[in-house]
Image (cartoon, rainbow, N blue to C red):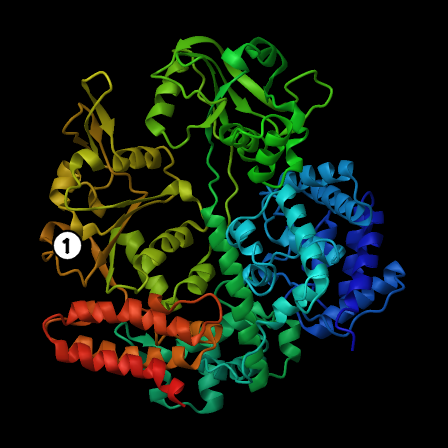
Amino acid sequence: MDKFAWVKIYMELATTLLKYKNNRKALVDLLQDVFAEVGMKFPYVEDDAPVEDIDPFTVMGSFNRGITNDNRVAILNGLKNRLALSEEVPEVFDGIPVLNNLKAWFFAGKKDRAIDDIQNLWDMFEIALSYADEATSEKRVRFITQYDKVTKQKIIRWNLTMGMYWCRPNTYINLDDRNRKFILQKDNLPPYFSTVFSGIDKTLPDGSKYLFMCEQCANAIKNGNFGYDDLPKLSYMAWKSTQDTGGKKSNAEFLKWFRPLIEALKDLGGSAKPKDVRDQIAKSLKLSEKEITETRGKTKTNKFANEVAFARNYLAYEGIIDKSQRGVWTLTDKGMACKMTEQMASDIFLKWVDILKNTQNDADNEVLEDPKTRFWMYAAGENSRYWDEFYENGIMAIGWDNLGNLLEYADRTEMIAALQDKNDSEKSFKNISLATWQFSREIKVGDIVYVKRGQSKIVGRGIVQSDYIYDASRTGYKNIRKVEWTDEGEWEHPGKAALKTLTDITDYTDYVLELEKLFAGEETVVEEQTIQSYTKYTEEDFLNDVFMSREEYERLARLLLKKKNIILQGAPGVGKTYAAKRLAYSIMQVKDAERVMMVQFHQSYSYEDFIMGFRPTKEGGFELVPGPFYEFCRKAKDDAENEYFFIIDEINRGNMSKIFGELLMLIESDKRGETLRLLYKNELFSVPANVHIIGMMNTADRSLAIIDYALRRRFAFYEMQPAFDEDSFNVMHDIASNAKYDAIIDEVSKLNQEIKNDDSLGSGFVIGHSYFCVTEKISDEDVAAIVEYELLPLIREYWFDEPSKVDTWTERLRGVVYEQNKD
């Protein structure tokens, strides 16, 4: 059986889809007919009606997502028949990247997408096919420009590389999470790949770098000896490397409820409330009272209800249960026809462990990206001699025209080499290459630009309106961006400007504030901020990310919303910091970093740092500077319709009375909105009702005294426990796929019990699960490293005055790691 038979029909289908670029309604109708014919629900619906427009990547994704092999074949056969394709439909799809069913569109919903988003995807699709079929320098520039435009759109990230791979798999490399990890492993590609492309594990490459990667990968595997000589074979090997599970089934306990849950829903007519489903399962299986009411852990979570809820989650991912209606579980058509087995349950679980892991990795990467406006200091030529022309034409520009189009360089190293080759081989060109790189790659639409003349004058301010443009028709300064110049004149520079042509000054907040003050005259019009689109983040996302039962999550969220102030306390490694921000996002329902702020307390932190205080100025005097909590509350007050979350790490390290001062009373839930006069300013201040404070406290820190009652009375305390016994933690066992990993966790559970029983320690000192959170299969050496460099140092600190206990547990933990090596 040819594992790569899919390549021909995928390419033929992509070429045929291009014919529908200007007849997209017909394509939507055709796709609807295909889904109706195979008996599947049409997944592309908006406002309870089929979408009116669609892009070709989403069409390709209709059969490249988390559905059964049979359904993939059926959909592709339907497309083949209606589009008169000549190539054969494959029987297997191994190694082809698939989309998460929850993120199977390449465009956002109506409310979140721009008017040109779908058209931009068609333009990207067209140039991707054209460049793959016949590469020219002109097409390369068009590809890079379109790629960089599309990757700024909502929804688009690594999935764009997957879509292009489906269409032309011999040209474009797929950069899903699995492939990214695979190509960075030193034995899978030439050694320099792990250095040149080290950033791709976190950051999506721009168009120029992506093409460079595709070319380098194709050449390396064609001329090397890696066991694969083209990109499809490479992608297949990356997939195959993650499929070896050693022939064992998942040991997740809740899998036993998959079949009873489906059968119970069938008995209840296909749809029922969760309690009714649990009652039906109990009746059908004749469960004892003990089995129904058994609880687990300190939180007394109902084991039966919790496990059934987890089973329902994975069946919903698989499309067996419809999760669109909250509070009601309904079987889909697929669910009504499903005959679940133990092997199917294990396969579904392991499949979604892998998909959700990849999704989480990409989601974490998204959080790392900074969507905020950036600020730039810029010189319009030497001493800004071209400022008048640039202002008149609404542009900013830089020189070094002999480099040509700056998008043709894969990185700064290439730019430096070209600058040395074309100008002076003895110079480093460090600053110039930084300016050309930032100008072409890093400046974004909406950024603020200040124009300087020399080091002492500011002559203009503007807002960037376009991406980078290479304008060959200009006689000089051919590298341009369009700018809306908001101010033109001459102002004294607050200090001395950097000598460089272009400088990113975003991180110098005080400096930016001083610059903005120059333009804040009496008639200044306040510019409305552009509405940002944020990634959705729901309760389900929280439960996938944090090892906590649904019941505990709902209790925690209710507690925070009611009390307003909560402290997550617990031993090292129970995931307090990890959970805090995600708790905020889940309540907001979006990953809106603008409404979340995080600070860390320490022993010398004060009111002046937190609320406001006097700070020295450059002139030798003092000025009153607001602190983070003051500014955060003001911001929240102006946006009363939305919830805001202020996160304080190591909250018990600070002196609360000293830090909050007169505002300590105002953070109480029943005092929100009441006002007090500030210590350093004749101003009435209040803490808005929409501000929620989440503190984190490490209960194993011996250096801290017991926290005072002023803190206790104003906060609710939620203790986070190790999640080794949570069903959701079974995902880690399946990802790690290592027997010693499983064994060491069992031993740590016994160690935790001894720690709890120790009068000098107690439950606040147990070892948390975050030491064992993994994102990929791990080796015995990785397990040994956890023991030697993370667990044993902690044990030595805990029992520093009881060396015999240290020796006992050192021997036990090392015994688990090394005993199998004696065989």
Q: Residue at x 66, y 22 (%)?
A: 478
Instruction: State the quadrant of the N terminus.
Output: bottom right
The secondary structure type at the circle numbered 1 is helix
Residue 265: percent from left, percent from top: 55, 78
Whether residue 153 is visible here, answered yes or no, is: yes
Residue 751: percent from left, percent from top: 24, 78
Instruction: State the quadrant of the C terminus.
Output: bottom left
635 over 578 or under it: above or below: above
Of 625 and 227, nearer the camera is: 227
Which quarter of the figure has residue 615? top left
45 over 497 or under it: above or below: below
Three-letter amino acid code of the residue under disc 1: Arg
Q: Residue at x 52, y 80 (%)?
A: 258
426 over 411 or under it: above or below: above
Which quarter of the figure has residue 548? bottom left
**From the viewer's perspective, is 817 left or right of 678?**
right
| Disc 1 target residue | 712
**From the viewer's perspective, is 657 left or right of 337?**
left
Instruction: Characterize the local packing of mark 1: few (<14), some (14-19) or many (20 or more) Cα atoms within 10 angstroms.
Output: few
Residue 88: percent from left, percent from top: 85, 69
**From the viewer's perspective, is 69 left or right of 771?**
right
